[in-house]
Image (cartoon, rainbow, N blue to C red):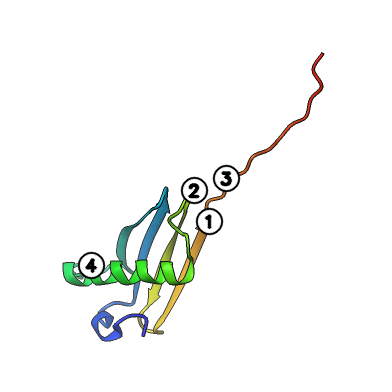
Amino acid sequence: MTFDWDKLKAFDKIVIEYSGSGDEGYVNDIRIEPEVEGLEIASQLYSELERRAVDLLYENFAGWEINEGSAGHMTIDVKERKVFVHHGWTIETTEYEDKELE
């Protein structure tokens, strides 16, 4: 099971933004979509979502936190019981130029 869906049933969607580089990876933000006045994610559930999101990143995008790293967001569609990840790898490139000097 990806998430404890029963704990999330009050929400339609939850978006988890993350980024990593230099051997460190972080969850930057967790938010509810659509935003509903008075509806918040309790701190214990926030911590659970954060831990599970990081676990899923390590399971599916090995090295997401290494070197130049990566960034993206994970959308938890509670009603459909599906998780979608929009993941981007940061890639450093080097371009060489040959020139004869006089």
Q: Position of residue 88 (x, y in %)?
A: 52, 58
Indicate the quadrant where residue 79 lies: bottom left
Asked if the residue at tag 1 contacts the one at tag 2, i.e. Cβ–Cβ closer than 8 Å, the answer is: yes
Give the residue displayed 47% in from the left and 60% down from the top. Answer: 63
Foreground pick, 76 / 12? 76
Rounded to the nearest whole Å, what is the CA distance between mark 2 and mark 3?
7 Å
Rounded to the nearest whole Å, what is the CA distance between mark 1 and mark 3?
10 Å
Q: Quadrant of the N terminus?
A: bottom left
| Left or right, 10 with reference to 81 | left
Q: Earlier in the sequence, mark 2 or mark 1?
A: 2
Rounded to the nearest whole Å, what is the CA distance between mark 2 and mark 4?
26 Å
Q: Earlier in the sequence, mark 3 or mark 4?
A: 4
Which is closer to the viewer, label 2 or label 4?
2
Q: The disc labelled 3 sits on which kind of residue?
A: Glu
The residue under label 1 is 89
Asked if the residue at tag 3 contacts the one at tag 2, i.e. Cβ–Cβ closer than 8 Å, the answer is: yes
Foreground pick, 4 / 42? 4
The residue under label 2 is 68
Q: Earlier in the sequence, mark 2 or mark 4?
A: 4
The residue under label 4 is 47
Rounded to the nearest whole Å, what is the CA distance between mark 1 and mark 4?
25 Å
Q: Quadrant of the C terminus?
A: top right
Crowding near the residue tagged with mark 1, few <14, some 14–19, many ≥20 C-alpha atoms within 10 Å: some
The residue under label 3 is 92
Which is closer to the viewer, label 2 or label 1?
2
